Amino acid sequence: MFAQATDSSSEAELRAAMAERMKANVEGDTEKIASSLADEYLQTDIYGYVQDKTAWLNEYFKPPAELIKAGKFRWETFDEKDVRIRAHGDSAVVIGTLDAKGTGARPDRARHTWVADPSASFSGTLRFTRVYIKRNGKWLLAALHNAVPLPPTAAAK
């Protein structure tokens, strides 16, 4: 966590920005999501595919956001856990776990997007690493890497 008392306000600001972003994700709020990203944003998905801000918004975020607004898709679960923050001045590295479950759409791995499917449900757990930067007093997401955790190994006997 943050080392100095003055940094606790920065952590609180960052956590508030993260909570706003989570809410915007669940609601499919494209404007809030876009404004939470740095212009130079990059994301690496679980398959190693890299998208810049424009590509990620257009390919990955907007399709389910439009389905959410149309009432055809919804997140039943979208919870972050085990979040750890390491601050470095006006930047921070955040790691944690995201548990997500939704109905009404499915990920399309080949096209790195989402497809409407009324009978589909999706659930999974991701480990994430995010890099935030503070610009003009606002925390912005600059980079994100998602990974699927390995299954637990059997204990040695």
Image (spheres, rainbow, N blue to C red):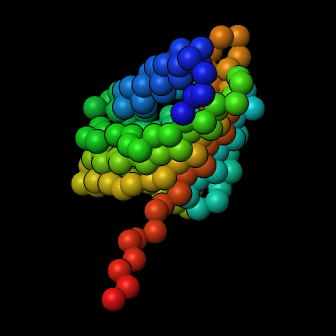
Q: Nearer the viewer, residue 32 or 81?
A: 81
Query: Residue at horizontal 38%, vertical 85%?
Result: 156
Query: Residue at horizontal 35%, vertical 80%?
Result: 155
Q: Is residue 151 above or below residue 85?
A: below
Q: In the picture, residue 37 is in which quadrant?
A: top right
Q: Is residue 99 above or below residue 22?
A: below
**Farthest residue, direction top:** 136
Q: In the picture, residue 136 is in which quadrant?
A: top right
Asked if residue 97 can be seen in this view, the reply is yes
How many callouts does the rendering have?
0
Q: Position of residue 42 (x, y in %)?
A: 69, 41
**Farthest residue, direction bottom:** 157
Q: Is residue 93 above or below residue 113?
A: above
Q: Is residue 105 above or below residue 56?
A: below
The N terminus sits in image quarter: top right
Q: Is residue 101 left or right of residue 111?
A: left
**Farthest residue, direction front:** 4
Query: Residue at horizontal 45%, vertical 53%?
Result: 126
Q: In the picture, residue 130 is in which quadrant?
A: top right
The C terminus sits in image quarter: bottom left
Q: Position of residue 29 (x, y in %)?
A: 45, 23
Q: Nearer the viewer, residue 48 or 109?
A: 48
Q: Is residue 156 left or right of residue 137?
A: left
Q: Position of residue 26 (x, y in %)?
A: 37, 31
Q: Position of residue 138 (x, y in %)?
A: 62, 15
Query: Residue at horizontal 60%, vertical 28%?
Result: 3
Q: Nearer the viewer, residue 105 or 29?
A: 29
Asked if residue 21 can be seen in this view, the reply is no
